[in-house]
């Protein structure tokens, strides 16, 4: 991997990680369209450490408060009813599905799941799911001629059951094209949470999973076409760009619909199917080095 490739891929990772359009799919597609080798699951996991560092800094006050309350709850019974302490436990519970499934399907994640036809399918299907979830949220928030405004749930109403459902939604993002934020936000909206609550828990839930995955994949950084220097460089690029994107996205969702992302996902998926069918792209483009 050249330094230019690592710069472009780090930029793509930072731009797409927090948007519901799948960063892993875009890394895969960028390499395929440019004629580069597939950067691979290991490169993706490590560069995600950069974007998760952006989450740690952006949500630093929340994270410090939650971690502090969680540790206190281990020895202080009274703290176990504290919302922040409960959030700490819920992040742990919600991280279990992706941890178990990530280890179980590691070979598929690094191989068959990176087929461009599968990515096109997940882009379209999950785009439609996000559109339905967004429409439901909009109807609750605005009401209608024969429909009263319905109050949506905040994170204070999050329990173990919903936390696990969020976790399984996050685990779906092991398949490129699904999108970690897209799947968890869709799940949250379908369960009746506000856009802001679903996005906030989605980002907090991603921290342990992504950091653990990145650390686990560090041993592969020097193998094949993934080198230490370019990979670390891409990680820093992803961090800087990711911080800007997450700040913008958290403001965007308070007043805007997810429909632009839905339309983008569906059109990209259709275009990808067309390019593969026309022979312009091989469904396994670039995988020889992956």
Image (cartoon, rainbow, N blue to C red):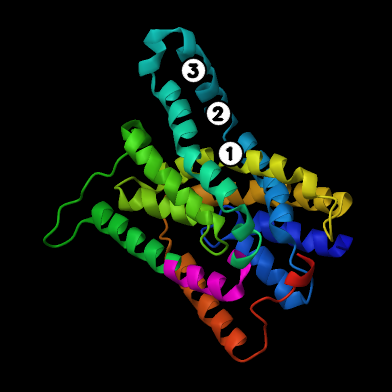
In this picture, which residue range is highlighted in magenta? 113-125
Q: Which mark is residue 63?
A: 2
Query: Residue sitting at 72 percent across and 46 percent down?
Result: 217
Q: Looking at the picture, tell me which residue is in the foreground, 262 or 277.
A: 277
Sequence order check, earlier mark of 1 and 2: 2
Q: Residue furthest bottom?
A: 278
Magenta stretch containing residue 273, yes or no? no
Q: Which residue is mark 1?
A: 207
Which residue is the site of mark 3?
Answer: 69
Instruction: Give the alpha-carbon distance from disc 3 to disc 2, as whole Å.
Output: 10 Å
Query: What percent of the width, then of the height, locates residue 225?
Result: 84, 61
Which residue: 39% across, 40% down? 164
Indicate whether 59 appears above or below 280: above
Residue 70 drawn at (x, y percent): 49, 19
Picture quarter with the C terminus: bottom right
Asked if the residue at tag 2 contacts the one at tag 1, i.e. Cβ–Cβ closer than 8 Å, the answer is yes
Q: Which quarter of the figure has residue 15?
A: bottom right
Q: Position of residue 102 (x, y in %)?
A: 57, 48
């Amino acid at each position: 991997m050249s330094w230019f490739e690592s710069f472009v891929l780090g930029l793509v990772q930072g731009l797409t990680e927090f948007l519901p359009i799948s960063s892993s799919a875009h890394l895969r597609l960028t390499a395929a369209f440019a004629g580069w080798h597939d950067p691979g699951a290991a490169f993706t996991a490590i560069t995600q450490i950069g974007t998760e560092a952006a989450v740690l800094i952006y949500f630093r006050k929340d994270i410090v408060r939650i971690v502090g309350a969680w540790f206190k709850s281990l020895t202080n019974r009274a703290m176990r009813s504290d919302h922040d302490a409960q959030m700490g436990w819920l992040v742990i519970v919600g991280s279990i599905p992706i941890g178990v499934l990530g280890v179980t399907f590691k070979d598929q994640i690094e191989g068959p799941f990176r087929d461009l036809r599968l990515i096109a399918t997940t882009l379209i299907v999950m785009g439609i799911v996000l559109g339905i979830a967004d429409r439901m949220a909009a109807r609750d928030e605005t009401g209608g001629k024969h429909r009263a405004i319905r109050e949506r749930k905040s994170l204070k109403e999050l329990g173990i059951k919903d936390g696990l459902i969020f976790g399984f939604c996050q685990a779906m993002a092991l398949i490129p094209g699904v999108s970690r934020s897209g799947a968890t936000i869709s799940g949250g909206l379908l369960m009746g949470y506000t856009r802001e609550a679903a996005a906030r828990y989605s980002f907090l839930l991603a921290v342990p999973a992504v950091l653990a995955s990145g650390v686990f994949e560090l041993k592969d950084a020097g193998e094949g076409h993934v080198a230490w220097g370019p990979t670390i460089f891409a990680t820093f690029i992803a961090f800087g760009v990711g911080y800007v994107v997450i700040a913008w996205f958290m403001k965007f969702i308070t007043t805007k619909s997810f429909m632009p992302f839905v339309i983008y996902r569906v059109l990209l998926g259709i275009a990808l199917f067309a390019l593969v069918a026309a022979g312009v792209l091989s469904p396994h483009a670039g995988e020889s080095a992956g």
